[in-house]
Image (tube, grey):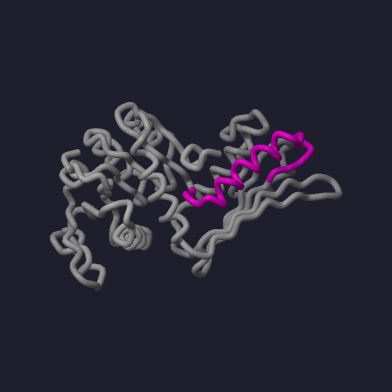
């Protein structure tokens, strides 16, 4: 990290995407961070252009590049809402640059997570299925409620997102499912029930169910339902503005500057 300015320099990956552009605007408007790099995939039309002009505005003095390592070498943090394969590659490069890597990418599988954990031995990684304060509070509450109720209470997680979302259940839904499983003292992988279709048979006692809704421009809605005979408890979070995720990611990037190498989540960042 060659830049010695006291304000952390941040690189945004996938800058042409909705979250990427939102992060860029947030960082440019911040007095606590500087935008020092913008990364896009090889062959993208923005490569070699000034980022501000590519976004349809005034120049910002940052050229979009596909050389992630060179960009990361100038930064103290990388914020990454891309795709699993790209995120794994970025994790290794961010660790090499000793930059904090904030991961908001969803759809990560066990093989991806293992490689991210390996990278966290050398640098700070903050990874969360959702960066918002409200969702992370919901996660904590879900674990507490699941711990208080026995398996006579069925747990169902229902999530809704915009039509363009490519993974299901959402990363947030899985985060909530993990919290419920932790509260129950079970492994989610052994009790996950999703993708019901046709004659599926009765619900298994103790399973944690998932349902996904896709349509329109829904930013994100998540319900955790605890259902027993004669009563239900419903915990709900509704996101109406993607800016909450960008603000959370920037907060994580700044928080990570003072941490030791390791893998963290937003519960750690928020001190919950």
Q: Position of residue 13 (x, y in %)?
A: 28, 52
Which quarter of the figure is the C terminus placed in? Answer: top right
Q: Quadrant of residue 150?
A: top right
Magenta residues, start to end: 130-155
Q: Quadrant of residue 119?
A: top left
- Is residue 38 rendered to the left or right of residue 195? left
Q: Is residue 214 above or below residue 114?
A: below
**Going by the picture, which residue comes out furthest to the right?**
230
Of residues 44 and 13, which is closer to you in this image? Answer: 13
Of residues 1 and 190, which is closer to you in this image? Answer: 1
Which quarter of the figure is the N terminus placed in? Answer: top left
- Is residue 238 rendered to the left or right of residue 128? right
- Is residue 115 rendered to the left or right of residue 168? left
Q: Position of residue 171 (x, y in %)?
A: 49, 47
Of residues 114 and 219, which is closer to you in this image? Answer: 219
Q: Residue at x 48, y 46 (%)?
A: 129
Q: Residue at x 58, y 55 (%)?
A: 159
Q: Is residue 142 magenta?
A: yes
Q: Main secondary structure of the magenta part?
A: helix
Q: Is residue 167 above or below residue 89?
A: below
Q: Residue at x 34, y 32 (%)?
A: 115
Q: Quadrant of residue 188?
A: top right
Q: Is residue 45 magenta?
A: no
Q: Is residue 123 above or below residue 39?
A: above
């Amino acid at each position: 990290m060659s830049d010695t300015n006291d304000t952390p320099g941040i690189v945004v990956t996938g800058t042409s995407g909705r979250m990427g552009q939102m992060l860029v605007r947030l960082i440019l408007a911040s007095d606590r961070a500087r935008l020092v790099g913008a990364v896009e995939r090889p062959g993208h039309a923005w490569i070699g252009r000034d980022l501000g002009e590519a976004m349809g505005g005034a120049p910002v003095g940052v050229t979009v590049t596909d050389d992630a390592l060179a960009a990361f070498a100038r930064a103290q943090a990388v914020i990454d809402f891309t795709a699993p394969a790209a995120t794994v590659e970025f994790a290794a490069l961010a660790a090499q640059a000793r930059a904090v890597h904030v991961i908001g990418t969803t759809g990560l599988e066990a093989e991806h997570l293992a490689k991210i954990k390996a990278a966290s031995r050398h640098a700070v990684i903050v990874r969360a299925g959702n960066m918002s304060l409200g969702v992370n509070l919901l996660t904590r509450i879900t674990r507490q409620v699941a711990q208080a109720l026995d398996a006579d209470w069925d747990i169902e997680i229902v999530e809704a997102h915009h039509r363009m979302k490519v993974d299901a259940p959402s990363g947030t839904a899985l985060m909530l499912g993990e919290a419920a499983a932790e509260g129950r003292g079970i492994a989610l992988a052994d009790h996950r029930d999703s993708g019901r279709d046709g004659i599926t048979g009765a619900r298994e006692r103790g399973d944690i169910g998932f349902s996904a809704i896709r349509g329109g421009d829904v930013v994100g809605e998540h319900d955790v339902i605890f259902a027993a005979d004669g009563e239900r408890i419903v915990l709900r979070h509704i996101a109406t503005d993607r800016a909450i995720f960008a603000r959370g990611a920037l907060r994580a990037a700044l928080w990570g500057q003072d941490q030791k190498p390791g893998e963290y989540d937003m519960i750690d960042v928020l001190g919950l």
